Image: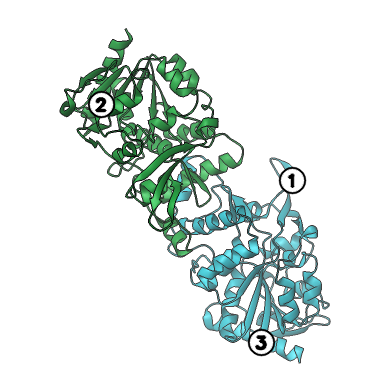
Chain colours: A cyan, B green
Amino acid sequence: MKIVAPAGGIGAARFLRGLRTAAPEAEITVIGNTGDDISLFGLRVCPDLDTVMYTLGGGINEEQGWGRADETFAVKAELAEYGVGPGWFGLGDRDFATHIVRTQMLAAGYRLSAVTEALCARWEPGVRLIPMTDDQVETHVVVDDPEHGRRAIHFQEWWVRLRASLPAVSIAPVGAEDAKPAPGVLDAIAAADVVLFPPSNPVVSIGTILSVPGIRDALAAKTVVGVSPIVGDAPVRGMADACLTAIGVETSARAVAELYGPSLLDGWLVDEADAGVAVDGVAVRSLPLLMKDAASTEAIAAAALDLARELAS
Amino acid sequence: MKIVAPAGGIGAARFLRGLRTAAPEAEITVIGNTGDDISLFGLRVCPDLDTVMYTLGGGINEEQGWGRADETFAVKAELAEYGVGPGWFGLGDRDFATHIVRTQMLAAGYRLSAVTEALCARWEPGVRLIPMTDDQVETHVVVDDPEHGRRAIHFQEWWVRLRASLPAVSIAPVGAEDAKPAPGVLDAIAAADVVLFPPSNPVVSIGTILSVPGIRDALAAKTVVGVSPIVGDAPVRGMADACLTAIGVETSARAVAELYGPSLLDGWLVDEADAGVAVDGVAVRSLPLLMKDAASTEAIAAAALDLARELAS
């Protein structure tokens, strides 16, 4: 079986780990969000790609959900001694090596998709990880800054530095309209038996991937089952509510499904707390959605897969 | 008093530390060798500039003579996990931060001299450190490689990876003939009361600096006193003998003084072991030249300064 999953960071990575266990024989292609990518200290950092790669490759900091296990921070401390920032982005020494390799390869002319493949040759994540695009797409957030007035800032500045404390006036994947899907993305979707949406942020993770011309239409032609990132009226993790509010969407499992819409989404898994939720044109199933350990995560992935198989047949 | 000193790495850095103590009121301008510079992992590494900066700034690994004190090697170990080399160049985590800052500034368009000044703003070395040039000069060594035949390799590959184990057929500062002295170099020399040559490698450190058009002539117009890097028939440290042999010069205090020549050199400090040495047109003094601690190093610097003052008056 061939599975395609567009993916953000932590939530997606954990879901994918469960999916790999639930479907050990499947060929899984992960389309990674690159809208969060940022250049720091002259190095190219791809937080979502790395979170997926490290999680599936066994190198993730499990407690934190991002970054490397057994991490140290000598480089960052030294950069601070030089007065070079930003200090708010937590790059550890082991993590730096990934960005150094990536930056060196990009400078040598390799495309991000080729670089990602090279990095994954070490990590052996057990899935094929492809960035959504090799072109630069950067998620910008417009905020009303008390000091500087209305301005657009990089997603990471809003998310990591400000912890989304300033309400977003709008969120946009800058550059997306001119971006092309990375080599292999459309082919993988075309060949897919099913498409699964992990419980990723529907605005700045999966929404960004869908904003690359061609990807949404290709996915819409497939059987798509999603896992709600919202339980009750709150995100399972992260600050998806701040993103949904910015685009005028209610923070609820139903509203997210409607945001994707029945033209894209065929099935939708919601938590037991949302058991009554109905979405026109979408098959909804409820089950415990908290990925609290390997077994519960695998069960969620298996349920998504079951529903997808059922809808596809 | 204004002092100018062209400088290589470890030997020069230690001598300069002694000089700073011997002449606390002096304005010392150090002209750093950049022929050893190398790009590793996409980062610009300037071994001699950094050795001077770290040593005078209190950050050096004292035992080793290069690199940072209290160093860790997480980044290097990770790069090796990615299969990215070379592994033979010992970059530590703290050191990496320096190269990251430098590379980012160079990419932003700053010249190496400006970058060096910015880095020194943190280290406060107590001297003005200027690279010999902002242009790229790279010392290459021609070797007869048993595997690949006669070929030119980067100085660092010969020096660090091969430990000079393959005899050098020739050594050349590639790019020197088109290089210009960095801003401030010729002005500092013109304003200098005396010029001191630390016991640096006469071929690949001071020799390389002298190969930048304009620098040798400017220095020759001044009172120049050098400290022999050779005691008896061996270098005080390093592998200067391998470099001297490559250019057909005997490994002796006298031969090095003659290599510089009386048109450049006015005074020459040799070790007590070489007390009988005479060089036409050069005032030779002997004293213990082993920089075994702060006091002995300061004494050597003070002797060089005394001889320079005497010759200048």
- B286 relative position to A304: left or right: left
Q: Mark 1 or 3 closer to N-term?
A: 3
* Residue indicated by mark 2: B254
Label 1 environment density (alpha carbons within 10 Å; few <14, some 14–19, many ≥20): few
Secondary structure, mark 1, is: strand
Q: CA distance from mark 1 to mark 3?
A: 46 Å
Labelled pair 2, 3 in contact (Cβ < 8 Å): no
Q: Quadrant of the N terminus of chain A?
A: bottom right
Can you tell which quarter of the image residue B201 is in?
Answer: top left
Quadrant of res B243: top left
Element assignment for label 3: loop
Q: Is residue A261 visible?
A: yes
* SS at circle 2: helix
Residue that lies at the very extreme toward the top in this rendered image: B313
Number of other residues with Cα within 10 Å of mark 3, as a class: few under 14, some 14 to 19, many 20 or more: few
Label 1–label 2 contact, CB within 8 A = no
State which chain disc 1 sits on: A
Residue bearing the label numbered 3:
A1
Q: For the residues labelled 1 and 3, say whether their Cβ atoms are less than 8 Å apart.
A: no
Name the residue carrying label 1. A151
